[in-house]
Amino acid sequence: MFDGPWDVGVNTGLEKGLYGLFDVGLNDYVCVSGATSGSHCNLQVTAMYVYIDDGYGMVSTISATQRTAGQIAIAGEDSGGSVFMNYMPPNDYNVSAIGMIQAGRDSVGTACGSVAYPGIECYRTVLFTSMRTALNNLPGASLLTF
């Protein structure tokens, strides 16, 4: 799992091992990693069942909102990125898979900070699909851990 800024390449020490799968609950804190905006942490789970139309029909997502003032949760084009939780004990270089980024809410406009595409829209809230849901519904999907 990559855990760093969008503009840092591989083999930088920002790669973390995937420990396993974890199911979050209300008020848990998660991190995200998207190709456009990089990694962001301190996102608090605020709702477990938020329904959105993803273009293929209504899907249930989980909502998490950025709790650090002036920071974003995701940027446009981060969809498909990972949602993870740092594994305990603190400073361990492993993470647990939580979900996959679906969409953003609570736009902050283009006040994003450092992102791959200047002028892109950014959001304080991320909507994501549980990794367990994705694994159970995508034929042949599995979670590779090490």
Image: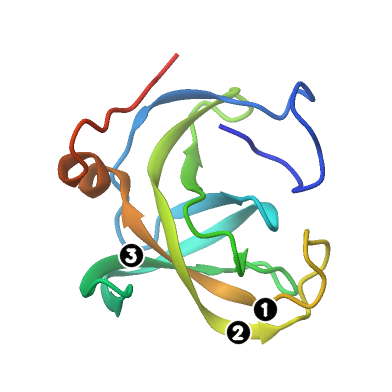
Choose mark 2 or mark 1, whichever is in front: 1
Considering every residue shown, the one lying at the far front of the view is 56
Tell me the kind of residue under disc 2: Ser
Tell me the kind of residue under disc 3: Ile
Query: 63 or 36: which is nearer to us?
Result: 36
The correct choice, above or below, for 137 with respect to 114 in the image is above
In the picture, the quarter occupied by the N terminus is top right
Disc 2 target residue? 107
Residue located 55% across and 51% down the image: 32
- x%, y% of residue 19? 42, 23
Tell me the element at label 2: strand
Choose mark 3 or mark 1, whichever is in front: 1
Q: Tags 2 and 1 in contact by the CB under 8 Å rule?
A: yes
Residue 5 appears left or right of 91? right
Mark 3 or mark 2, which is nearer the start of the sequence?
3
Considering every residue shown, the one lying at the far top of the view is 146
Disc 1 target residue? 121
- x%, y% of residue 27? 39, 62
Residue located 60% across and 84% down the image: 107
- x%, y% of residue 31? 54, 50
For the image shown, how many numbered marks are present on the structure? 3
- x%, y% of residue 87? 48, 30
Q: Residues within 10 Å of mark 2 (few under 14, many from 20)?
A: some
Query: 117 or 75: which is nearer to us?
Result: 117
Q: Examine the image and state in which quarter residue 144 appears.
A: top left
Disc 3 target residue? 62
Residue 121 appears left or right of 9? left
